[in-house]
Amino acid sequence: MLEHRPVPQPQGDDDPWHTGAACRRDEAGLFFAPSKEPTAARLSREEQAKQVCARCPVLLECREHALAQPEPYGVWGGLTAAERRVVLARRRRRDTELREAARVPARRRIAG
Ligand code: SF4
């Protein structure tokens, strides 16, 4: 069974961003889905979690942590797991395009 915790555990002394988190451990039920959660309940819960994230001073750090792990479940940095998958797919596509552009000789790029 997953340990539900909206605030990540410390990764080491050099990673203290979570100490500024707006979410509390007793709010874990807001950030992680119970099993067999109906869609309407999930959407409502995720919206409430996002409202907590919206006032969180470490939103960007939390989001990047969740994208880098990647965290497969829960709301992190104001994004659901599905939304993080979209962000990661876009980043992969962008990186691929940048790598491809770097391989194309400058002459071809100018010619179109
Ligand atoms: S962004 Fe959201 S999940 Fe992340 S630490 Fe802040 S309140 Fe918690």
Image: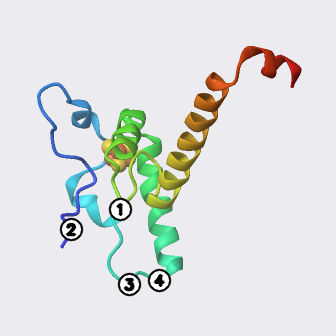
Of callouts 2 and 1, which one flags the residue occurring earlier in the amino acid sequence?
2
Q: State if disc 4 and disc 2 touch (CB < 8 Å).
A: no
Q: Which mark is residue 4?
A: none
Q: Secondary structure at mark 1?
A: loop
Q: Position of residue 102 (x, y in %)?
A: 62, 22
Q: Amino acid at mark 4?
A: Pro
Pointers 2 and 1 in contact (C-beta within 8 Å): yes
Label 2 and label 4: CA atoms lie apart by 19 Å
Q: Mark 3 or mark 2, which is nearer the start of the sequence?
A: 2
Measure how far apart labels 2 and 1 are at the Cα level.
9 Å
Q: Secondary structure at mark 4?
A: loop
- At label 3, counting other C-alpha atoms closer than 10 Å, the crowd grade (few under 14, some 14-19, many 20 or more) is few
Q: Which residue carries the number 3 mark?
A: 36
Looking at the image, tell me whether mark 3 or mark 1 is earlier in sequence order.
3
Q: From the image, tell me which residue sits under label 2.
A: 2
Q: Is disc 2's CB within 8 Å of ligand 1?
A: no
| Residue 79, x across and y down, in percent | 47, 51
Check contact, mark 2 vs mark 3: CB within 8 A. no
Q: Earlier in the sequence, mark 1 or mark 4?
A: 4
Residues marked 4 and 3 touching at CB (< 8 Å): yes
The single residue placed furthest to the left in the displayed view is 13
Q: Against 26, is 34 above or below?
A: below
For marks 4 and 3, give the CA distance: 6 Å
The residue that label 4 is drawn on is: 38
